[in-house]
Image (cartoon, rainbow, N blue to C red):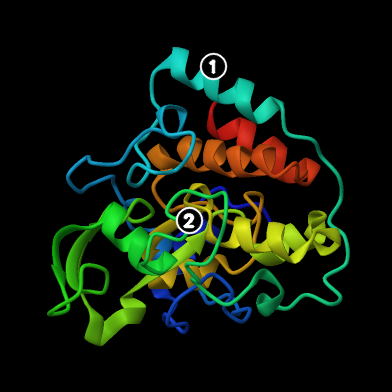
Amino acid sequence: MRARGSRAILGFSMVAAVLAGCGPLDTEDIGVDHLAKSAPPKAGGSGRGASPLDNPDGTRPGLAPITAAKEKAKAREVIEKVATKKRGSKDGYDRNKFGYAWADSVDDVPFGRNGCDTRNDLLRRDGQKLKYREGSTCILVSMTLDDPYTGKTIDWRKEKAAEVQIDHVMPLSYDWQMGASRWSDVKRKQIANDPLNLLPVDGSMNSSKSDSGPADWLPPIPEIRCSYAVRFAQVALKYDLPVTPEDKEIMLEQCA
C-alpha cells in the first residue's frame, strides 16, 4: 500500500513504544475513517530546519521544505542517481549487528568520537532551549524540538524520553535487506550513527514508520515529503545502497 495520505497520517494515533532508536516492532494499522475527514497537518515550528540540498553531511538541523521549481528539479536529479532492486531477505537481521545503539566510538562520521553519544548529539543539533544535566556538557534533560514530520513543537523532558525518538531515515532493517547484510561491522556502525541518516522526531511517527520505505510511509506533512525523499536518496548514495523501484517512483513523485 502506498503512502499517499492515510498511511502517513496513521502515525498520530500510534503510541511510542521504543525509548530511542529506529527499530520498533511492527504495528498493526488501525481505523482512520475519522482521521481522513480532518485537515492535513501543516508545517510549523521556528523554520530552523535546513534544506537537504544545502546540508549534504547532515550536520545542520532538521529538514526544511523544498518548494521552488528549480530546487525540486535539483532534488529529482539527486533521486534519479539512486539504483534500484527488490528487497532482499530480512533473515539474520539484528539491530545489534549495527553496533551498540548510539555509541560515540564511530570513525569517519560527523560527531563521532566527540565525547558525547549519538542520541544526545542529535538532540543538541536539532533542539532549542537546551538544558543539560548538572555538570555535563552532553546529556540533555530538556529542550524544545520542531518536529519535521508533524510540524508541532515538542517540549521534551528526559523523564518522558520516548516522546522524542531518533529516526533512521533509511531504516537499518531496510539497509540490511538492500545490501548491508554483506557489509563489515564498521560500515554498519557508521550508517547507524551517521547524522545524515538521523532525525529526532515525534516518537509515534518513528513507531508508525517502522522499517518502511517511502512507498509505504511518508511524513504526514506534504510540504516536507520532497525533502524527506532527498534525504533518503542522499543516504542511499553515500552508502551505495539501492532502493526498491516502488520507493524510487514515490520519491520522484514527491519532488514533481
* Whole-percent x, y for residue 81 in the image: 71, 27
Looking at the image, tell me whether mark 1 or mark 2 is earlier in sequence order. Answer: 1
Instruction: Give the tally of numbered discs.
Output: 2
Q: Dots 1 and 2: beta carbons under 8 Å?
A: no
Q: Residue 211's mark?
A: none
Q: Is residue 253 above or below residue 21?
A: above
* Whole-percent x, y for residue 79 in the image: 64, 30
Q: From the image, which quarter does the C terminus lie in?
A: top right
Question: Of helix, strand and loop, which one carries label 1?
Answer: helix
- Residue drawn at the location 70% of the way across and 45% of the way down: 239
Return the residue nearer the eye: 89 or 136. 136
* Whole-percent x, y for residue 101 in the image: 53, 75
- Residue drawn at the location 56% of the way across and 40% of the way down: 229
Return the residue nearer the eye: 204 or 134. 134
Q: Given this view, does label 1 or label 2 mark the residue nearer the observer?
A: 2
What residue did someone put label 2 on?
A: 198
* Whole-percent x, y for residue 250 in the image: 65, 39
- Residue drawn at the location 50% of the way across and 71% of the way down: 103
What residue did someone put label 1 on?
A: 73
